[in-house]
């Protein structure tokens, strides 16, 4: 494959910066973006870091009709030594390539895209928030742009990366969430696209999410599609339980998103000598373990939320309180420890950090 040439076109007008104390999540976008195009003749071409702005799309662009789209989410942080650090960026770009294969889309040259990302983050460094708990959220995405209404894998694509300074994902911040256990709608079935990070999975989740919100819950916990019995994942993250002092999380079996933060939790837990089990876990087991006191914590793990403690599950009109409704010590230790790793405060023993500056 020929080397990707990246053009740099800087903006002439820098945007006003947001209120750093009130960032919210994903509302403000930086000055630049990265774009590149693909067609079957030229492969990836016209790679450019350019001023952030809208695209022109043909109304027949296939993404608008058939949702041929994939995306990723990763973060950059201010390092303790003044650097700007990307956390596990190649793991995200490689996962994007696995999603691409599942969705019949072209793979990206991950190493070269990482170089472009480093350049772009360095250029927009003034947008990387300084406050602890805040970060620069990076959203790579790919869409099918070929203008065609007949159904086939598109012959033209656009890949782009945009960035936004973000605070905590949930309005409640790092506080225990209340999660609705969804036993009617399902997220993914075996053989489907559950393990691909494709927009359609998230669009399909919105109805359940809206109903959960109406019941006062922050998120949905999905169950397996076949029996509506086994836990799968939370709307925007993977899920962990602490039972008898050990971590339990559902195994990756094709229907669950292979979370990078999930993997981080498993590796960090191993480093800390906490036993972790990837196994199926049913709602019956959760109810029994919460009742006999062996289930002491539950938390979600994801790039956007990092670690999100769960204080309560609402399941078939029944409230299941976890750990007295408080954040547990393992969730707290992981939240603190992972954030310190992401900022280079703790040593990077796994080689997860990539310097942008
Ligand atoms: C992430 O955690 O990065 C995600 O992609 C979840 C998204 C819905 C914000």
Image: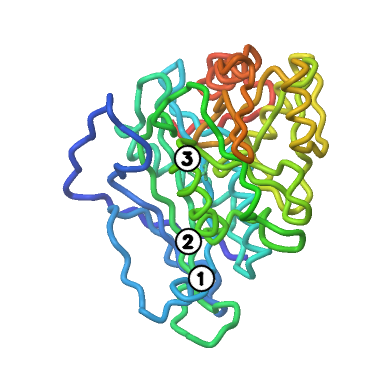
Residue identifier under label 1: 38
Expressed as whole percent of the image width and height from the top left, the position of residue 264 reads 67, 30
Expressed as whole percent of the image width and height from the top left, the position of residue 165 reads 35, 35
| Alpha-carbon span between mark 3 and mark 1 | 44 Å
Q: Give me the residue at 31% from left, 45% from top.
A: 29
Closer to the N terminus: mark 2 or mark 1? 1
Helix, strand or loop at mark 3: loop
Q: Is 2 placed left or right of 214 in the picture?
A: right
* Circles 3 and 1: CB atoms closer than 8 Å: no
Expressed as whole percent of the image width and height from the top left, the position of residue 341 reads 57, 20
Callout 1 crowding tier (Cα within 10 Å): few <14, some 14–19, many ≥20: many
Residue identifier under label 2: 159
Closer to the N terminus: mark 2 or mark 3? 2
Helix, strand or loop at mark 1: strand
Q: Nearer the viewer, residue 320 or 74?
A: 320
Mark 1 residue's CB less than 8 Å from ligand 1 = no
Reply above or below: 97 against 222: below
Circle 2 or circle 3, nearest the eye: 3
Mark 2 residue's CB less than 8 Å from ligand 1 = no
Reply above or below: 96 against 246: below
Helix, strand or loop at mark 2: strand
In the rendered image, the quadrant that contains the N terminus is bottom right
In the rendered image, the quadrant that contains the C terminus is top left
Residue identifier under label 3: 215
């Amino acid at each position: 494959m020929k080397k990707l040439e990246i053009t740099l076109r800087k903006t002439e007008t820098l945007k006003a910066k947001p209120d750093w104390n009130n960032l919210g999540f994903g509302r403000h976008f930086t000055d630049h973006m990265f774009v590149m195009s693909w067609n079957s003749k030229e492969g990836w071409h016209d790679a450019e870091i350019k001023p952030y702005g809208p695209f022109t799309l043909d109304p027949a662009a296939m993404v608008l009709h058939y949702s041929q789209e994939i995306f990723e989410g990763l973060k950059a942080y201010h390092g303790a030594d003044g650097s700007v650090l990307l956390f596990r960026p190649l793991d995200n770009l490689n996962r994007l390539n696995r999603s691409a294969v599942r969705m019949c889309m072209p793979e990206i040259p991950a190493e070269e895209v990482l170089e472009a990302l480093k350049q772009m983050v360095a250029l927009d460094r003034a947008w990387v928030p300084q406050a602890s708990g805040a970060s620069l959220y990076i959203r790579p995405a790919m869409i099918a742009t070929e203008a065609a209404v007949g159904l086939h894998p598109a012959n033209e694509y656009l890949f782009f990366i945009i960035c936004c300074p973000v605070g905590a994902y949930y309005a409640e911040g790092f506080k225990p969430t209340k999660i609705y256990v969804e036993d009617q709608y399902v997220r993914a079935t075996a053989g489907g696209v559950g393990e691909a990070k494709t927009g359609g999975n998230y669009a399909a989740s919105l109805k359940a999410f809206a109903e959960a919100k109406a019941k006062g819950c922050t998120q949905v916990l999905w169950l397996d599609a076949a029996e509506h019995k086994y836990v799968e994942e939370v709307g925007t993250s993977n899920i962990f339980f602490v039972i008898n002092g050990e971590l339990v999380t559902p195994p990756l079996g094709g229907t669950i998103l292979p979370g990078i933060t999930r993997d981080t939790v498993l590796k960090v837990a191993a480093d800390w000598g906490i036993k972790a089990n990837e196994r199926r876990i049913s709602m019956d087991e959760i109810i029994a373990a919460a009742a006999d006191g062996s289930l002491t914590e539950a938390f979600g793990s994801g790039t956007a939320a990092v670690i999100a403690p769960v204080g309560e599950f609402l399941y078939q009109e029944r409230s299941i309180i976890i750990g007295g409704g408080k954040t547990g010590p393992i969730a707290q230790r992981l939240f603190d420890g992972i954030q310190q790793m992401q900022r280079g405060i703790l040593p990077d023993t796994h080689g997860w950090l990539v310097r942008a500056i």
